[in-house]
Image: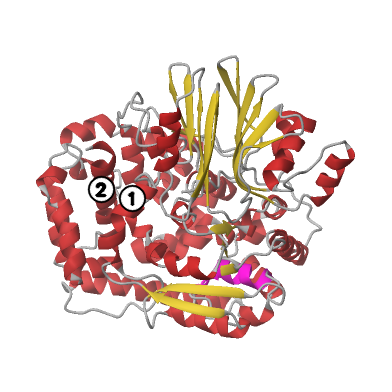
Amino acid sequence: MPGIVAIIDSESDKTLIDSMACAITHEKWQLKDLYIKPPIAVARVHLGVSNAESQPIFNEDRSALIMMYGEIFDYEEEKKDIISKGHRFVFDNDPEFCLHLYEEYGERFVEKINGCFVLLIYDIRSKRILVANDRHGLAPLYRAQNGNKWIFATEVKAILKDKMIAKEIDDRTVADFFAFGRIFGNKTFFKSIKAVPPASIITWSDGKISERQYWDYKFEEEYDPSLTEEYYVNTLAALFTKAVKRATKKKYRFGVFLSGGLDSRAAVAAIDKKSYPISTFTYGISGGDEAKIARIIAKKLGTKHEFVELRRNYLVSFAEKGVYLTDGMLNCAHFYWISLLPAVRERVDVIFHGLGLDILLSTVLSHTMFEHFYHGGAGLFLERQISRTKGDVFSDLLFRFFNSPVSEEMMPLFFSNAYYQKIKEYPRASFEEHLSSVKEKDPVNRVDSFWLRQFGRYNLSRVILRNFVEDRLPSLDIDFFEFALRVPRKFRFRRQALYFKLLAKLAPDLAKIPYQRTGVSPMMPDLVHRIGFLIQGVYKFLVRNLRVKTHGFISLPNWMGYPDIGEWIRKDENLRSFFEGILLDSRSLNRGYFNPSFISQMVTDHMSERKDWTNLLCALLTFELWHRLFID
C-alpha cells in the first residue's frame, strides 16, 4: 500500500531505504519520493492524486521538513491564521500546512487536524524527529528497533528488509487470528514488529524514543434528557453532509461502492452530485439482492453504474497477492473486491465508503444479532443478556460472542497437542487484557468501544484498495464521529432505527428502497424490520443447514448478501483443487501448529457437505500462504 517508510539512525543506509520503499510499491503507476540525511532516511510511495508534489517539503528557512502520506480536510481558516503569523506557502498543500502548524503549536498540532495520515517531521535545528498517525490509524503503521536504529513502515514486509530484524513468530498473534479472526492490540505475526496504535505521537531525540496517545474512543454516558431523537438525527445528518463536503472540495473523479446496505447509500446521498458526477460500482453474484438493490439506487441517482460479477475461482488468482499486500493479517474470505479494483481505477481517483457507520449508529449487538441468529440461534436474546450482566459473567459472555472461528472448546482438536499446550491460555488472556482497557461502564457501550478498538482498527481490506485509488471515510470525520459517540445508548440500541432515520433525512427517496438485511424499506416501522431480520435469518439458516444435513441433496439458492464462498470451494473445480492442494499438502500439515488428521477431516467434511468450515478453511489458507511468503 502507498505510504511511508523511515529509518532513524546515526548512519545513512540508502540500500535499505530503497528496498523498503520498493517493498510497499506494488503497481507500476505508484510514485516514490526519497530523502536521506542522517539521522533520517525516509521515503514516500503515492498514487500522484492527492498531494502529488514531490516530498519532503521544507519550511521557509529549511530548518524543518515533512514527509506525509494521506490527506487533511477543511483547514482554510487555520491556514489564514498561519499566514497572518508570517508563514509562506509555496506548494499550498496538506503537508506544507501541517509543517507550518507544527512550527506554531509543536506536537499538539496533530490534535488540530482532521484527516487520514501518517507523517514524519524532522526539526533539523533541534535534531528532533516526530512520527504521528491519525485518530483511527486509517493507514497502518508498524515499527521495530534494531539496537539504536528505529524503523517505521506502513507495511510489515518493508521492515523485514532489514535482515537484522528477527522473524520469530508471535504465538499470541496466531492464537488471536484463529480465535477471533482478527489480531488484537499492537501485535503482528512477528514478535519484533509492532503496530503503532492509532492517535500516536512518537518523538525521537538524542537517540531516545517517547510515545503518547493524543486521543481515544470514549462513549458519552451522561446525557441531557431533554434532547430528543430528532435532535440527534438532524445534527448527525448535518455533520455527515459537512464531512462529505469537506472531502469533495478538490476536483477529483469520485466514486462509491454501492451495495444493498446503508453505509454506501448514506455516503452517495450526501455528495453534491450536480457539482461532482459520481460513478458507482457493485461486485457480487448476478441476480443477487446486493446487485438488484444497488442497481435501483444507481438508477434513482442517475450515476454511471458498473456491476462486476465475481468469478467463482477469483481466489486462485488473487489469494496470494491479497495475503502479501495485507501481511497475512486479513482472512482471504474478505478479498472480495480485489478483482474489481482495476476497473475502478480506470474511472475514478477517489472512492467513498461508509466504513463502520452502521455499527456507530446502532450497536455491535443489534447490528450482528441477525448473523448470530443464523449461526447459532442465540442472537435474539444476546442483546438483553449482555446489557444486564456485569463482571466475570459479562466478560465470559462477550468472549464467547467474539470467539470465532476456533472456539475455546475446539482448540485442543484443531491445534497439535504441543502447540495447544503452548497457546491455550492466550486467547482469553488477550481478550481480557484489551477489554480491561475499555473505559465505558455501560455494558453495551463497553462492547461497542471494544469493537471499535480491536475489530474496527486497521481495516486491512483498505490496504488493498489504496494501491489503486484514494479513499474517503466521512463516517470517521472528527466532528461527525465525536458527536456520534455522544448519542444516548437508548437511541442506538433500537436495531438501527436511528440509522434508518438518518438516511431518511439525507435522502428520502433512497430510504424508500429496500434494505438488503431485512428486505423492506428503511422507512417501515421497527416491527416490520424485526420480522424481516427474522425471515432472512431463518432463510440463511436453512440455506446452510439443509445443505449440510442432507449432504447437498437439498440446496436452496443463496440470493441474499455476499457470495457463498463455501459453496464455490465445493463446486468450482479450480478453486477446490487450489484449497485442497495447499491445505492437504504435507508442508502445510506438518508445520506443527495444527492437528493434521483434524484438518484433513475438516476439508473432507466441507467438500462432502457434512459441515460448513468456510471461514476456518479460508483462515488456514491465509496463514499457510503467509508462511510461504514471509517465513519459507
In the rendered structure, which amino acid carries the disc numbered 2?
Leu
Question: Residue 386 or 197: which is nearer the viewer?
Answer: 197
Please give left or right for residue 28 compared with residue 436 in the image.
Answer: left
Q: Tell me whether circle 2 and circle 1 mark residues in contact (CB < 8 Å).
A: yes
Picture quarter containing residue 135? Answer: top right
**Picture coordinates of residue 611 (x, y %)?**
20, 63
> Could you give the CA–CA distance between mark 2 and mark 1, rounded to whole angstroms?
7 Å
Instruction: Point out the stretch of residues depicted in magenta.
Output: 256-270
Answer above or below: position of 291 versus 575.
below
**Picture coordinates of residue 472 (x, y %)?**
60, 58
Question: Residue 47 or 517: which is nearer the viewer?
Answer: 47
The circle drawn on residue 323 is 1
* Badge 2 or badge 1: first in the primary sequence: 1
Q: Residue at x 68, y 79 (%)?
A: 508
Please give left or right for residue 4 compared with residue 604 in the image.
Answer: right
The circle drawn on residue 599 is none
Q: Residue at x 47, y 56 (%)?
A: 29
Question: Residue 367 or 64: which is nearer the viewer?
Answer: 64
Please say whether residue 28 is visible from this viewpoint.
Answer: yes
Judge whether residue 487 is colored magenta.
Answer: no
Question: Could you say whether the residue bearing mark 2 is in a helix, strand or loop?
Answer: helix
Please say whether residue 377 is visible from this viewpoint.
Answer: no
Answer above or below: position of 374 versus 589.
below
Categorize mark 1 by other alpha carbons within 10 Å: few (<14), some (14-19), many (20+): many
**Residue beneath disc 2:** 625
In the rendered structure, which amino acid carries the disc numbered 1?
Val
